[in-house]
Amino acid sequence: MKLKDKIALVTAGASGMGRAAAETFAAQGAHVIVVDVDEEAAGAVVDGIAASGGSATAAVVDVRDLEALKKLADDVTAEHGKLDILYNNVGIPGAAGLDMTPEEWDTGLEINGRASFFLSGYLTDALKASGNASVIFTSSTSGLIGSPFSPLYSFTKGGVIALVRSMALAMAGDGIRVNAIAPGSVETPGLPAFFRASPEETEKRKAAFFAQIPLGRAAQPEEIAQVALFLASDMSSFVTGVTIPVDGGLTAK
Ligand code: NAD
């Protein structure tokens, strides 16, 4: 029980890596707030955690809505008085290429950058109240090396890496650690959208992309959740301001 009595909030917690982290955190004793726009899927994650003997609640929020994020932060603070783990995991592939509308650009930034930035701000007092909080962001290998699929995605995920360094410095005095995980390809429901092709062509592109990964495969969401658990827990008590690639060796090349 590495997270006994901890309160954790996971954005995009209803699917993929967020779901795996929510389940892992709950299995380690945390109460998990599963934040997602998909009410049914968030409810299913919460039910699954409860059925396994864990503790979780769902918060249905579209992270583009800053007022809703503020209310979420206020509700968490009122109910729990503190937040120990904030996993800013939400993100979308966004528009591809350079030919996009300003609205598409804004949506990419709103979901991949703005939401996590403001939610972290709204929750700062609750994180301070923990006395030993961990903030985790989901970046991407596309923030470390160029994404062949989307410059916008690389821009937002690279921005997360810079943000994490800066936030780690700004929050260190309050006992808050801030780090990021940079996953490579992970077999989640969201993965096919990165390839932006028909189902048949997606399978071809996936196979070609996976062949470039030194370990020869994509990750499972649970393999990312183990690194999130490390960052969330006291196992990483002296780790702050870093981005950990979890990519099967992709960026080691
Ligand atoms: P996923 O696609 O499986 O799930 C995404 C979840 O986000 C869904 O439950 C969806 O309802 C929710 N969501 C989307 N827009 C939302 C909004 N506006 N408000 C609230 N919730 C919203 O996700 P995943 O593939 O596990 O990706 C999670 C994170 O990892 C993202 O930041 C993604 O960019 C990043 N990432 C993914 C991969 C990959 O290979 N899958 C690789 C590197 C980084």
Image (tube, grey):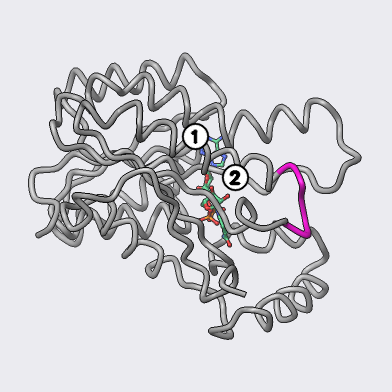
* Position of residue 89 in the picture relative to residue 45 (left or right): right
Q: Which residues are magenta?
A: 147-152
Q: Can you tell which mark lies on residue 157?
A: 2
Cα distance between the residues tagged 1 and 2: 10 Å
Mostly what secondary structure, the magenta segment? loop
User: x, y percentage for residue 138?
Assistant: 48, 48
Along the horizontal axis of the image, is 18 left or right of 183?
Answer: left
Q: Mark 1 Cα within 10 Å, few/some/many (few <14, many 20+)?
A: some
Residue 188: x and y, percent? 53, 63
Please state if 145 lies on the left or on the right of 197 as rendered.
left
User: From the viewer's perspective, is residue 174 above or below residue 94?
Assistant: above
Where does the image place residue 64, in percent across and percent down from the top left? 57, 26
- The image shows residue 158 at horizontal and vertical percentages of 60, 44
Identified by mark 2, the residue type is Lys
Along the line of sight, the residue nearer the viewer: 168 or 18: 168
Q: Is mark 1 within 8 Å of ligand 1?
A: no
Q: Which mark is residue 147?
A: none
Asked if 32 appears above or below 26 in the picture, the reply is above
Callout 1–callout 2 Cβ contact below 8 Å: no
Residue at image location 22% in from the left, 23% down from the top? 126
Residue 86 found in image quarter = top left
Q: Earlier in the sequence, mark 1 or mark 2?
A: 2
The residue shown at (32%, 45%) is 240
Q: Label for residue 163?
A: 1
Residue 38 visible here: yes
